[in-house]
Image (cartoon, rainbow, N blue to C red):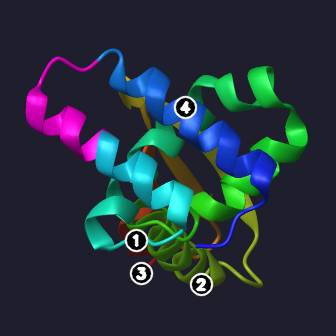
């Protein structure tokens, strides 16, 4: 991982802030290892996953932008896409885009969003030829079901 020194410094501070709230010794040791990995730029799979978790919390809360500015936030967003969590989201979005591509050329008759639960919603799209339901949650946008008109 090669990161801008400003981003590296912000990441080290975010990891330290995150670690202060952890009481589990094993989780703390992972944070210590992550600090070293970010410093050297050498991250193994476990460190990429840990970095993805810290970035997720820092980005979702708005903390990175508030403390370090939009430039660091944008760099962190790009870095997040390289983490296992970011790659999982990219995969989910690719599946959703593939499902949405099936609607090309159809006339949209109705679109609704309904609550599934905390942080999870259904997007329902009804066209002249089908009805599609997608789940929007923290892990991305996922096709749930597609019904075609008979």
Marks 1 and 3, how far apart at CA: 13 Å
Foreground: disc 4 or disc 2: 4
For label 3, the SS is loop
Residue wearing tag 4: 14
Mark 2 vs 1: CB contact within 8 A: yes
Of the image marks 3 and 4, the number of the one nearer the N terminus: 4
Q: Which residue does the image show at 76% across and 22% down from the upper left?
A: 67
Expressed as whole percent of the image width and height from the top left, the position of residue 15 reads: 46, 35
**Residue at 42% across, 53% down:** 36
Which mark, residue 146? 1
Disc number lying in front (3 or 4): 4
Residue at x 52%, y 65% (from the top left corner): 40
Task: Give the mark toward the camera: 3 or 2.
Answer: 2
Residue 122 included in the magenta stretch of the image? no
Location of residue 117 in the rendering, given as x and y in whole percent from the top left corner: 33, 26
Tag 1 secondary structure: strand
Q: Is residue 23 magenta?
A: yes
Query: Along the polypeptide, which appears first: circle 4 or circle 2?
Result: 4
- Does 126 appear above or below 27? below
Q: Indicate the quadrant where residue 104 lies.
A: bottom right
Relative to 20, does residue 102 appear above or below in the rendering?
below
Give the mark nearer the N terminus: 3 vs 2.
2
Kindly report the secondary structure that dominates the magenta region of the rendered protein.
Answer: helix
Mark sitting on residue 150: 3
- Cα separation, mark 2 vs mark 1, equals 10 Å
**How many angstroms separate mark 3 from mark 4 (CA)?**
54 Å
| Residue pointed to by mark 2 | 102
Specify the segment rendered in magenta: 22-31
Vertical comparison of 132 with 9: above or below: below
Q: Are marks 1 and 3 in contact (CB under 8 Å)?
A: no
């Amino acid at each position: 991982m090669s990161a801008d020194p400003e981003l590296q410094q912000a990441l080290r501070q975010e990891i330290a802030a995150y670690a202060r709230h952890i009481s589990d010794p094993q989780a703390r040791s992972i944070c210590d290892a992550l600090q070293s990995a970010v410093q050297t730029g050498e991250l193994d799979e476990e460190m990429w996953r840990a970095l993805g978790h810290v970035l997720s919390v820092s980005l979702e809360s708005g903390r990175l932008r508030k403390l370090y500015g939009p430039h660091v936030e944008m760099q962190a967003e790009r870095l997040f896409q390289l983490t296992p969590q970011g790659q999982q989201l990219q995969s989910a979005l690719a599946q959703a885009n593939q499902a949405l591509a099936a609607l090309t050329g159809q006339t949209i008759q109705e679109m609704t969003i309904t609550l599934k639960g905390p942080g999870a919603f259904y997007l329902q799209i009804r066209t002249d030829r089908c009805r599609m339901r997608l789940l929007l949650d923290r892990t991305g946008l996922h096709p749930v079901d597609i019904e075609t008109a008979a």
